Amino acid sequence: MIDTLLGDIAVGARVRDAAGRVQSWLERRDARAVGVRARVLRAFLDEGIAESDLAGTTGYGYDDQARERYESLLARVLRAERVLARLSIVSGTHAIVAGLDALVPPGATLLAANGAPYDTLRHAISTAPHSLVSRGVRYVEVPRTGGGETDHGALADALRAHRPAVVFVQRSRGYAARRSLSIDAIGALVAVVRDAHRDAVVFVDNCYGELVEEREPLEAGADVLAGSLIKNLGGGLAPAGGYLAGSAETIERIAARVFAPGIGAGLGPTLGFGRALVQGLFYAPLVVAEALRGLDFAAALFAELGFPVDPRAGEPRTDIVQAIRLGSRPRLIAFARGLQRAMPVNARFAPEPGPVPGYVDPVIMSSGSFVSGATIELSCDAPLRAPYEVYLQGGVTAEHAALGAVLAADAVLRLDGGG
C-alpha cells in the first residue's frame, strides 16, 4: 500500500520507516476495536431495527419512528437512560451550550474542571454577547497542571469553595497543549467531584471521543454527555446534528430548553435522513478504528521527521485527534496545504489563515469532506499562535489518512529545503 501511495514524494524513505515501526501497534489496537464493534452490534440486535423504522417524517415530526429508534440506539451505545439527538442541534458547541444553559440557573456556578474549554465554547460561556455569564451564571476554571493534566487537588478546593451546579469536563484536547482524557481519567475526576460536592452535575464534552474506548463517560460516573453527530458517531454518513445523553429527567429538562417547555422532545422531524443516521452509527466503530490507525501512522511519520507529537504512535488514544508541534507559522500553512491535496473534495484549493468566529487568533483549516464540518473525515485545524501545533483529525480509511499525512509531511519538508 505504501509504495502505491508514494510516487515522487520527498519523504519516501521516512514514510517506509514509519510504516515499519507502526505495524505492530496497528495490530495491537484491533482488540479494543473489536470490543467497540461488538458493543454497537449488540445495541442494534437488542433494538431490533426494522426497515419500516427508517422512513422518518417532515414538518413537526410527530411520532417520527426513525428519530425514536435512533435515539434509543444511541442510548444503548452510550449507556444512557435517554438521548436527545436532533438534526436541528447543529454542532457540538450548540449541544453543550444548550445543556449548560438548561442546567446552570442564573446565580449558580459553572466550574470547568480541567482548564479552559476550547476557544468557541469558552467564548460562548463567558465573553460573547448573550453568553451564560452575561445572564448571571458565575464561571470558574481550574487550571491544569504544568504537564497538562487535571489538577485533582485544585479541583477539590474549587468544588468546596464554589459549590458549582455543574462541573464541565472537556474530554478532547481542543486547541491546547493538554492531554485528552481517558475514560479512567474521567472516572478519577468524577470521584473527586463526588467526594467534595456530591450534588454537582458532571457534564462531559464527548466530542471526538465516542467509540474510541470500550466504555463511555456515563459508565465512569458522569451525568451528562454532549457531542456532534457528524464526528465519530456519524460514521461519515450522518448529514448533520448533535446529541445530549444522560438521565431521563435531565434530558427532558434540556429538551425544554432546546425546544419549548411543555413540548420538550416530542417534536423533531428526521426529514428522510433517519436511514443515514442509523447506518452511520452502524459503521461508526469501523470508521473510528480506521481513523486511529491512520493517526498512528501520522504520529510515527512526523516523529521520524523530528517533530514532537502527542500522542506518540502506539500510545493509548482517547480521541481522534493527533497533535503535531511544527514550531512555526509557515510550517502550519504548508502542512494544511499539503493535506488539502489529499482531499476528495476541493483538493485544488490552497487553505489560507483567516478569522473564525469564537477564536482570538487566525486559524488555518484543511478539509474536503462530503459533509461540511465532519471531522471524522480527514481534516486539520491550527490556530496561528505559539507553539504552532496542528491538530490532525479523523480519516474514514487509514489509507486516506496516511496519504494525507504523507502529502502534508512532503509540503513541510520541501518548505524546510528537504528532498
Image: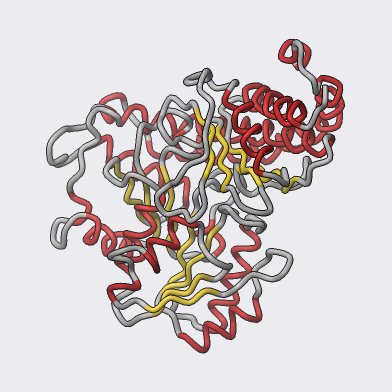
Vertical placement of 235 versus 178: above or below? above
Residue 45 visible at all: no
Task: Name the residue at the bottom extreme.
Answer: 161
Residue 264: image location, x then y, percent: 20, 56
Quadrant in the rendering for residue 402: top right
Residue 300: image location, x then y, percent: 79, 35
* Quadrant occupied by the C terminus: top right
Q: Nearer the viewer, residue 31 or 273?
A: 273
Residue 268: image location, x then y, percent: 20, 43
Indicate the colouring scheme. Answer: secondary structure
Name which residue lies at 27% across and 64% down: 253
Q: How many marks?
A: 0
Vertical placement of 223 versus 310: above or below? below
Residue 91 visible at all: yes
- Does 6 sit left or right of 401 as displayed? right
Name which residue lies at 25% across and 26% down: 52
Name which residue lies at 53% across and 31% down: 351
Q: Nearer the viewer, residue 370 or 205?
A: 370
Name which residue lies at 48% across and 32% down: 235
- Does 291 sit left or right of 122 as displayed? right
Residue 125: image location, x then y, percent: 39, 66
* Quadrant occupied by the N terminus: top right
- Does 399 sit left or right of 231 as displayed? right
Vertical placement of 350 versus 381: above or below? above
